[in-house]
């Protein structure tokens, strides 16, 4: 997997107060570059912020977002656990290869490579990703390189 990871893309936050959280990260130099919603995941608001000097992103989602997240270990039979930090994301060349390699190194499956269309009034973005639970329990996303 070492040669497949080509960069760190973003971390994701479930915000109790969406706009206040976006505004806070704005004071740290992050600028909004894309926003969207995914009703099928109860996601009303999500925005990608970018810090040009740091060359990194923060994804901020509203508190109703229904995604697997970082937190305590899942109990038997639970789909996933929710918490404030939703996942770590690594930019990869091949999301399926990263998924399979991670499983081979002790990760638990969450989502094989999937393609999604993130639509907004300004710009539509196609993404391809996969997700795993690390052996420690955090959610890791493998995102094929994309511009927001």
Image: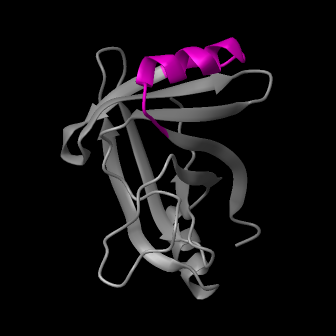
Closest to the observer: 44 or 120? Answer: 44
Look at 44% across and 17% down and name the residue there.
19
Q: Pick out the residue farthest to the left.
A: 40
Instruction: Give x and y (percent) for residue 72.
Output: 52, 68
Look at 29% across and 29% down and name the residue there.
119
Colour mapping used in the image: one colour
* Depicted 140 relative to depicted 100: above or below: above
* Depicted 111 relative to depicted 108: above or below: above
Look at 58% across and 69% down and name the residue there.
98
Instruction: Give x and y (percent) for residue 64.
Output: 30, 39
* Depicted 147 relative to depicted 89: above or below: above
Instruction: Give x and y (percent) for residue 31.
Output: 60, 16
Q: Classify residue 107 as left or right of residue 80.
A: right
> Could you tell me which quadrant the N terminus lies in?
bottom right
Residue 54 drawn in magenta: no
Q: Classify residue 4 as left or right of residue 130.
A: right
Residue segment shown in magenta:
14-33
């Amino acid at each position: 997997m070492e040669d497949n990871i080509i960069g760190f893309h973003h971390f994701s936050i479930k915000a109790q107060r969406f706009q206040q959280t976006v505004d806070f990260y704005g004071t740290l130099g992050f600028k909004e570059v894309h926003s969207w919603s995914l009703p099928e995941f109860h996601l009303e608001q999500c925005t990608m912020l970018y810090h040009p000097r740091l060359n990194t992103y923060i994804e901020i989602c509203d508190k109703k977002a229904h995604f697997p997240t970082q937190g305590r270990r899942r109990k038997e039979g639970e789909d996933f656990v929710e918490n404030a930090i939703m996942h770590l994301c690594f930019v990869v060349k091949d999301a399926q290869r990263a998924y399979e390699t991670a499983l081979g190194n002790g990760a638990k499956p969450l989502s094989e490579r999937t393609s999604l269309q993130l639509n907004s009034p300004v710009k539509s973005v196609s993404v391809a990703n996969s997700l795993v639970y690390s052996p420690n329990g955090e959610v890791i996303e493998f995102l094929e390189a994309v511009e927001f």
